[in-house]
Amino acid sequence: YFVIFAPSVTALAMSSVGLANNYLVVCSILFIAGLSSAIYHVPSPVMIKNLSGNRVGTGMSFYMFGGELARTIGPLIILTAISFWELEGSYRVIFIGIFATILLFLQIKDIPVRIKVSNNNEPPTLLKVLKLRKEIFIISGALVLSKSFMILALTSYLPVYMTNKGASLWL
């Protein structure tokens, strides 16, 4: 159900940014949106693997294609909403997330949740997994952090700079 309801929570949070009246509220809304996004993106690849049978590559390809399509179309949709209704009116696109939740509910509500346990029938604890794979987490964390700084410069600071210099939002 995390996968089912996360699109609505994310859409609600992201579309409410324009209604925030101070910095703390904006940070709280963005935290909720990020948490909701993480709640969706952690279990959904596992579901894809379980549902794809022996065609995991095909299933993940469709999953990743849908994600890239959303990442491409999403900014165009919110930019259109902001152009028509300004930031304060962007809440009007919440229905897209609600529609996605309805579709997901109808498609995956009956999928059983499976928990894979170790040989001794005791699920591994988070601490055990972190200790066992600490090198991977450190390297992955460093890569994600460095990549985030580069992406932040291109996705946040550059558009703000261009808009302040007189460029349109569409540019």
Image (spheres, rainbow, N blue to C red):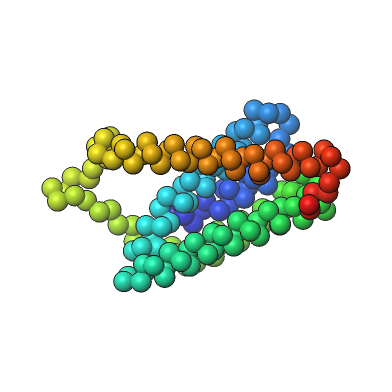
Q: Nearer the viewer, residue 82 or 170?
A: 170
Residue occupying the point 40% across, 41% down: 140
Residue occupying the point 60% across, 43% down: 151
Q: Nearer the viewer, residue 154 or 94?
A: 154
Q: Is residue 69 above or below residue 148?
A: below
Residue occupying the point 74% across, 43% down: 159
Q: Is residue 150 above or below residue 69?
A: above
Give the image location of residue 95, x and y in percent. Answer: 66, 57
Residue 27 placement: quadrant:
top right
- Quadrant in which the N terminus is drawn: bottom left
Q: Do we see residue 119 in this rendering? A: yes
Q: Nearer the viewer, residue 165 or 98?
A: 165
Residue occupying the point 81% across, 42% down: 163
Give the image location of residue 4, x and y in percent. Answer: 49, 56
Residue closest to the far left: 120
Left or right: 33 with respect to 1?
right
* Total numbered labels placed on residues in the image: 0
Give the image location of residue 68, x and y in percent. Answer: 56, 60
Residue 129 placement: quadrant:
top left
Give the image location of residue 127, x and y in percent. Answer: 28, 34
Q: Do we see residue 96 in this rendering? A: no
Residue closest to the far right: 166
